[in-house]
Amino acid sequence: MRAALLAFFLSALVPAFAQSPQIPSFWDARERIERPQIELPRLRFLTTVDFPPFSSLDANNQLIGFHVDLARDICRQLSLDAVCQIQALPWDELVPALENGDGEAIIAGLAPTAELREQLSFTRPYLKFPARFVAARSAGLPEPLHRSIRGKRVGVVSGSAHEALLRAHFPDAVVVPFSRADWMLRDLKAGRIDAAFSDGMRIANWLAGDEPDDCCAFVGGPYLAPEYLGQGLTIAVTRDNADLATAFDSALREIDASGRFAELYLRYFPVSFF
């Protein structure tokens, strides 16, 4: 338990002191992934239109977003541009469509649960959603945060994975549950709580908007805890098409190594949640 806690806190130290935007990477630069030979008459990615900034429709009814651009980059990396397609479907239709052969892959934030792993194969995670603390710029919460947060009133959404994580790893914080994240962030800005603990991407989007009025900033973290927060974003294929998942892994690693992933990340997440 002591070793797990130490690893949890050490994982947060480097990003907390960095000044430039942190670009997440989940690939070992020394690893070489053997790419299977892939020849397809069509490579159709299935996604949704209700998951901005990952996938949505623009004013011209065109599909846009991080996942849309990433899928196209994967196609280019695999030299499959000519047969590359991206189709949007309602969320509940994604897995049936894949299994019926109406697409070759799902890129829509489908969680690789144990149950789904019996039906589908998944790539490695290419993006994860860390938990983050956000506090007033004047709060004075230095590292190590598990000490400076002692006795501080920390807002968190009631019943969430973030509440469980906060209570387990920061037992000396005074937990203030909220039923809604926007009420929590409103109270943070008003000074009624000392900090908030939530999904890093949600907080980053809030910080990037006008509402905070530069009141607040990330402190500590990021905290990656898959036992609470899941494995991250992956691409799903059918079980009999596992070689395609391996080819995607190879392409994703090369996209990361080339700097293209960083470019996409900062385009859609100008306030980094890492």
Image: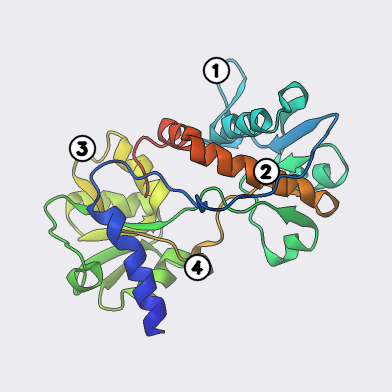
The residue where tag 3 is placed is 213
The residue where tag 2 is placed is 248
How far apart marks 3 and 1 lie (CA) works out to 28 Å
Asked if disc 4 and disc 1 are in contact, CB closer than 8 Å, the reply is no
Residue at point 29% right, 57% down?
A: 14
> Where is residue 55, by image quadrant?
top right
Asked if disc 3 and disc 1 are in contact, CB closer than 8 Å, the reply is no
Q: Sequence-wise, which precedes: disc 3 or disc 1?
A: 1
Residue 203: % across, % down: 35, 48
Residue 228: image tag:
4
The residue where tag 1 is placed is 59
Residue at point 77% right, 55% down?
A: 120
Residue at point 33% right, 69% down?
A: 9
Residue 126: % across, % down: 55, 48
Residue 45: image tag:
none
State the SS at label 3. Answer: loop
Question: Mark 3, residues whose alpha carbon is within 10 Å: few (<14), some, or many (≥20)?
Answer: few
Q: Which residue of the protein is positioned furthest toward the bottom in this rendering?
A: 1
Asked if disc 2 and disc 4 are in contact, CB closer than 8 Å, the reply is no
State the SS at label 2. Answer: helix
Q: Sequence-wise, which precedes: disc 2 or disc 1?
A: 1
Q: Amino acid at mark 1?
A: Ala
Side of 149 relative to 138 (left or right)? right
Instruction: From the image, state whether disc 2 or disc 4 is nearer to you.
Output: 2
How far apart marks 4 and 1 lie (CA) works out to 37 Å
Above or below for 106 versus 219: above
> Where is residue 175, by image quadrant?
bottom left
Q: Amino acid at mark 4?
A: Tyr
